[in-house]
Each structure stands twice: as C-alpha cells, then as structure tokens.
C-alpha cells in the first residue's frame, strides 16, 4: 500500500509533502500572516538579532496562503539590510523550529528580503530566475507579509541554501557545507585579509571567514583550498569547475559585485558532493545588476559598471578563485563561452527587460500600497530604465546598465572571435555492455573533449576526442571527431566541448546543466517508472503504489522466471520474478510496495524513493539487461522512454500499459498547486477554492477516504478523525488539518 516507513507521524508528513508539488516558490505573491502572543515582538526580534546567538521568537502561528503552521521560529536576518529602526526588516521563517517535519511543500525555511537597496524590486527574483537556467540557484518569488494583523509590506521570498537545496541540486543531503562570511571571530595567529578561497595551514583560521553548516569539516575545507592554491593542475578532482565558471560568468555579466568575483568574502556557499568535489553556489542577489559598487576605484562611474572587465580581479593576489581559474587559457575560453550563452539567451534579445517588466506588473498594486517601502512608487517604476538617487547612493537603472554592457561585451575580441561549430551525429540507441563511438562533426576546431556519465549524481568523465581516423571518426582530418567509451545498461548522458585558438563552445550550450542522451537498450526494457504515485494509477487492490513498467520490444515472448528487479546495484537479486511471460510488444507492471504475494499482481519487497533511485533489471545469468537512474521525481508524474521501448527517459504524464508516444512529453513538467483549503485547521467543514475537477481526499497513510463524482466547493469533515489530510483536485494537492 502507499505507506512509507514511519518513525513518527511528523517524519512521515515531511516525506509526503516533499514529493508533492513545490509551489511555495512559484512566481506569484504568497500571503504570509504571522501571529505573535507578544505585542512587543519587534523589540524582542531586535534583541535576538543583537545577541547573535541564533535565538528565534516563537510565533503562535504562521499562515501561508491560508495554510497554518504552529510554533514557528522567527528571527530577523541580513547585514546592511537590517536596521533596528526599520519598520520592514528581513525575516527568516523556520517552520520546523519546534515541530520537527513541519514544512510548506517540503520546505521548512523561508527567507524574506526587504528590498532595501533595489528601487525596482525585481533584481533578486529576476537574477535567481535567470541563474537557474545554468546552475544551481535558489528559487524565489514574492510575499505580502503581515504581523498580528498589521501589513508590514511586500518582500521577496527566497529558498534557503540548506540540506533540501543540496539534495535538489547535488543529489546529496549531507556533506561538508560552508557559507562564506566575515564572522567576526578572532583567531590568534591568523592575520591579514581573508582573501577569496585563500589557503591557511592552520584550519582554525577558516572560522574567521566561513560559517560551517555541517559537522567538523574544517580539515576537508583546508584540503580543498590547498589544492586550489598550491596544486591547481588537480583542481577538477576536488572542485566542480563547470559550476564555478557558470557562477563567475553570471556574476560578471550582470555586474553582481557583492561576491567572490569582486574579492568580497560574502554571498557564496561551498558544498562537497558525493563525488568528492566542492561546489560553489551563489547567494544574496539583492544587490545584483549594478547596485553594489564597493571594491571598485572611487569615485565609481557608470561606465565602470557598464564596461567591467570580463576578467575582473584576474591579477588580485588575494582572490584565488579568479587568479587561479583565469591562469588557464582553456578555463577562460569555457568561461567566455558560458557568458556568451547567457548574454545571447537572456540579454541581447531583451528577455531580461521583458521579464523584469512582467515582475513589476505582478507586484505593482501591492507595492504601491506598501506602508514601509524604502523608495517611492516613482522610483519603483523608473528604475527599470533610469538611475534613482544621486551621488554615492545612485542606483543605476537596469536597462541603463545592461544595454550598454551588452554592446560593450559584443564588441570585445573574446566575443567577436568565431568559435567552432558542433553538429551531433549520434542519434540511434546502442546495446547494453557494448563499446560505443561518440562522434560529432566539429568544424574550425583544434581540440575537443567528451564529457559523459550514466547517473545524474555522478560527475562527467572527460576524455579527449580525435579526428585521426582511429576513434570511429571516419577519415583523419575530415572534421569528424570521435571518442570511444564502454557502456553498461544505463543511458548515456553526454556533452561536447570544442575550441580553437580564439574561442570555445559547448554542445548543448547550457552544458553541464543540460546534456545530450543516448538510449542504451535491448529488446526487453524498463519502459516507464512512477516513483511517487500519489493518486494517478491504482493497483488491483485500489491502492496507489510506486510502479515499474517493462516492455518487450522483441519478436519473441520472454519468460521472466529467474529475472530480478532491484533498486540496489550491490544487491541485484533483491526481488525475483515468478514464472510469468511477457509477450512481444506487450507490457508488464510491477508494483513496488512490499505487498509480496498478499495481493494480486506483481509486488516487490521494496519501495522506490522519489528523491533519488535506481532500478535494475537482471537476467538469470546475472547480466543487467536494463538500468535507470532518476532524481527529484515529481508526484504523479511518470519517467518514460520516448519513443516507446527504445528512446531516452523523460518526464511526462503517465502512459500506463500503453505506448509512451501517445503522451506528449515534457522535459519540464511543472505541477502547480493553486488550490486553497480553508479554514485550516478545521473541525467542521472545509471550503475549497481553485479546484479544477472532482475532489479526492487522502489520509496520512495515503488511503483515499473521500472522493466526489462532480465538482464541489466544500466538504463536511465533522465526523472524521483528527489528523492530517491531503485534498487533491487534478494536479493540485493541499494539506489540511482536522482538529
């Protein structure tokens, strides 16, 4: 049945909510209502901030779009954006401060920024939105905040960079984790400027410049920075260089100087993933797009921002990030290639300005009635295009900055140089456990490499490609480059980088965030998976369990007696098939729910995880016939081979026991929850807004306890047991509590 391992009811709840749609950060305006018992809440929050002990004030309740959470931890946050005299200070909301597992859509921390330096009020949301196309970056939206019934104003609502963030982006919750920040801690014997990613022989010195958010990992941070500083030729063993290049290119292009590219020891995180590499994650975009100017020669002129050197700080001995990376001509070309991609996709076509205008229209009425804004409404409307203020507090207009910067960049030699062209020629599927030639038509190039992997959680392995006639590349010197790799039973994920003396290019251009794929299949395949089947496909007993679909694309029937299905590559014989046959061009469903032989149909002895999982199909001789790795599986969304039986996997609406080609695939399936349930909690009747079709209600064990045959706008719950319930309509799911 649809029930996970239960330690406590609250633990179970957070797992379920984490598999639901993550709608709190959908672009819109969240309505956040905070209620304190203490009428002097502002003084208390100021005191906690001044004490700097991590204390939080307990809010009696917090309502987010009408959904209530109790005993929530609240504190003020920020550095320059905080001031005890402000009527609107930045806020950090920790939903699970007291009640373990309490969250909204799987997130337990919301960070609210007050827009203290941004008259346009779009820089933070816009910057994160653009960045997420190319690298891990927090989600962001807006929120209207009131406290004890009094409107405080409009905020930006930002995802916390925490374990949930690392799980989403690096497929690992736990690992060495640091925030770069001047801490004010004084360590004897550690003198001088911090330097960006500078190495210290005494790891205690790092406590001055980093906040550790994991266990005792100072030595691991020291080893990484030792390699960066003193053994740079080995940097890719300890650092995800591609993500660093994307972050650096984005911050330089957008003149976001409150961070490491401007030698500011602030606003980035370091996380060590399960491949042993530290990853840089950007943070705090509230002064992006030209607001922050410290560190530039005084007085700072508008032209200094518009024509910021693309290799800014490349000769700053205290900035090991820029000086080391820019010491490599190859990394410089990769960096420019990434910057060129962002420039062309977001700025040269004015997409950034159109999106900024849309965001302003979204918040216009709310901001115009904000009682605690830092700027006038006229400043708000004009700062998209024009500077606001005067002298040292001038805030440059967004298009005023970027239009000139676009022209400046486009005329640099690095951007006028012609990069190679890459035409991908590998399209057909390949057989498991074979040797494969990856080839591409690459013109105007004197060097190319292939990056490839088989799992989302793995790093890309890099091997050089050759045009020498010995790597499946045809005739030497014909512009066809090739590389030879050995594959197992998992699909190939790959990209190609090529360069000449002047410029480099990636295919796809958003690599490594995006990549090409080649299906690795034989006749019998894992054809479709649903790892978070909340209410889409019931099994023979009417329960909603995870499932795996097999497909026989061969010409002969296959008896599966002696075959195995497993979710563990170290235990491939975890569950064995009975004496059952799958016919040619036919499907077979296996339910992953531990029901075993107690229910009709095929049921494994294990369940799947929607966070990250692998499924292995093994034949009687122990050979893996097919294997699939997936991460971050949305609720009620399938992961299916398209074209059916031999294509690569993509997210789409399920095609249970039918041809996957009949369903329109969508690589970016988004499940939105616009439905609202109120009052919440309730002990009598709940009313439903935004339901698109019939209603279904599930209890905490995943059992459906109510459904309507037609649309309804309320449900009488007076006879129900107290507890947590989930109401579902179409693709929307909302939690509510019966008192």
Image (cartoon, grey):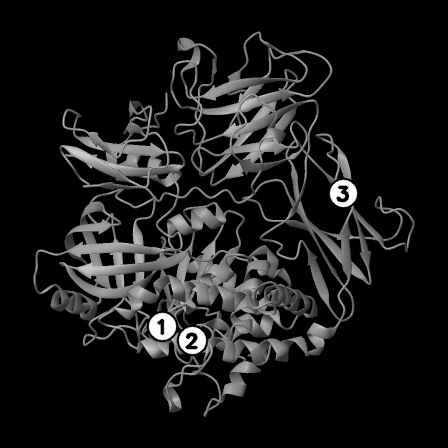
User: Height in image: 137 above or below 71?
Assistant: below
Disc number lying in front (1 or 2): 1
User: Height in image: 415 above or below 455?
Assistant: below
Residue 317 x %, y %:
54, 80
Asked if the residue at tag 2 contacts the one at tag 1, i.e. Cβ–Cβ closer than 8 Å, the answer is: yes
Asked if the residue at tag 2 contacts the one at tag 3, i.e. Cβ–Cβ closer than 8 Å, the answer is: no
Instruction: Name the residue tied to disc 2.
Output: 194
Towards the viewer: 179 or 158: 158
Is residue 55 visible in the rendered image? The answer is no
Is the N terminus in the top left, top right, bottom left or bottom right quadrant? top left
Crowding near the residue tagged with mark 3, few <14, some 14–19, many ≥20 C-alpha atoms within 10 Å: some
Instruction: Name the residue tied to disc 1.
Output: 182
Taking 606 as reference, is 14 left or right? left
Disc number lying in front (3 or 2): 3
Q: Helix, strand or loop at disc 2?
A: loop
**What residue is drawn where x is 22% and y is 37%?**
687
Residue 157 x %, y %:
33, 59
């Amino acid at each position: 049945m649809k029930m996970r391992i239960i330690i406590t009811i609250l633990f179970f709840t957070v797992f379920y909510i984490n598999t639901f749609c993550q709608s709190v950060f959908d672009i819109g305006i969240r309505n956040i209502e905070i209620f304190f018992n203490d009428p002097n809440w502002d003084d208390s929050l100021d005191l906690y901030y001044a004490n700097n002990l991590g204390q939080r004030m307990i809010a009696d309740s917090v309502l987010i779009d009408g959904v209530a959470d109790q005993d929530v931890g609240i504190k003020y946050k920020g550095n320059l954006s905080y001031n005890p005299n402000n009527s609107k200070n930045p806020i950090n909301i920790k939903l699970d401060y007291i009640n373990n597992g309490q969250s909204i859509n799987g997130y337990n921390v919301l960070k609210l920024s007050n827009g203290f330096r941004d008259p346009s009020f779009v820089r933070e949301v816009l910057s994160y939105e653009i960045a997420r196309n190319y690298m891990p970056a927090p989600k962001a939206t807006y929120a209207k905040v009131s406290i004890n019934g009094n409107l405080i104003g409009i905020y930006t609502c930002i995802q916390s960079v925490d374990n949930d963030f690392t799980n989403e982006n690096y497929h690992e919750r736990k690992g060495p984790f640091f925030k770069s920040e001047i801490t004010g801690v004084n360590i004897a014997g550690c003198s001088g400027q911090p330097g960006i990613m500078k190495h210290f022989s005494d790891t205690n010195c790092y406590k001055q410049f980093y906040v550790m958010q994991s266990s005792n990992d100072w030595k691991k941070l020291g080893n990484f920075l030792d390699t960066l500083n003193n053994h740079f030729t080995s940097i890719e063993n300890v650092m995800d260089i591609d993500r660093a290049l994307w972050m650096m290119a984005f911050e330089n292009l957008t003149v976001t100087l409150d961070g490491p590219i401007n030698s500011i020891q602030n606003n980035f995180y370091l996380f060590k993933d399960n491949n042993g590499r530290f990853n840089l994650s950007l943070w705090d975009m509230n002064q992006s797009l030209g607001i922050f100017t410290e560190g530039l020669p005084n007085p700072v002129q508008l032209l200094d921002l518009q024509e910021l050197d693309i290799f800014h700080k490349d000769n700053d001995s205290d900035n090991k990030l820029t000086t080391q990376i820019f010491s490599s001509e190859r990394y410089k070309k990769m960096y420019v290639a990434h910057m060129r991609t962002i420039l062309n996709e977001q700025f040269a076509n004015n997409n950034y300005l159109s999106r900024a205008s849309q965001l302003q229209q979204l918040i216009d009425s709310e901001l115009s009635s904000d009682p605690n804004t830092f700027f006038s409404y006229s400043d708000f409307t004009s700062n998209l295009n024009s500077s606001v203020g005067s002298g040292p507090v001038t805030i440059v207009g967004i298009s005023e900055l970027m239009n000139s910067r676009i022209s400046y960049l486009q005329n640099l030699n690095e951007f006028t140089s012609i990069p190679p062209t890459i035409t991908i020629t590998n399209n057909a599927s390949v057989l498991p456990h074979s040797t494969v030639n990856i080839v591409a038509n690459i013109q105007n190039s004197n060097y190319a490499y292939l990056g490839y992997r088989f799992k989302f959680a793995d790093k890309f392995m890099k091997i050089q490609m050759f045009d020498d006639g010995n790597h499946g590349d045809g005739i030497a010197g014909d512009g066809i480059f090739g590389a030879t790799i050995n594959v197992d039973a998992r699909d190939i994920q790959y990209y190609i980088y090529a360069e000449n003396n002047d410029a480099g290019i990636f295919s796809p251009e958003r690599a490594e965030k995006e990549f090409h794929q080649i299906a690795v299949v034989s006749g019998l395949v894992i054809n479709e998976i649903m790892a978070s089947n909340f209410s889409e496909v019931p099994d023979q007993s009417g329960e909603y369990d995870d499932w795996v679909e097999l497909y026989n694309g061969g010409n002969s029937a296959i008896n599966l007696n002696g075959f195995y299905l497993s979710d563990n590559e170290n235990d491939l014989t975890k569950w064995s098939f009975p004496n059952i046959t799958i016919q040619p061009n036919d499907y077979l469903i296996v339910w992953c729910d531990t029901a075993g032989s107690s229910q009709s149909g095929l049921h494994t002895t294990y369940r799947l995880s929607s966070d990250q999982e692998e499924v292995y199909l093994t034949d009687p001789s122990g050979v893996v016939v097919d294997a699939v790795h997936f991460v971050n599986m949305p609720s009620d969304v399938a992961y299916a081979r398209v074209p059916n039986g031999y294509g690569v996997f993509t997210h789409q609406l399920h095609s249970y026991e039918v041809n996957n080609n009949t369903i329109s695939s969508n690589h970016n399936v988004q499940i939105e929850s616009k439905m609202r349930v109120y009052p919440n909690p309730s002990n009598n009747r709940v009313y439903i807004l935004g339901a698109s079709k019939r209603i279904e209600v599930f209890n905490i064990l995943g059992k459906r306890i109510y459904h309507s045959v037609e649309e309804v706008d309320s449900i009488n719950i007076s006879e129900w047991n107290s507890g947590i319930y989930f109401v579902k309509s179409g693709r929307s799911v909302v939690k509510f509590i019966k008192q």
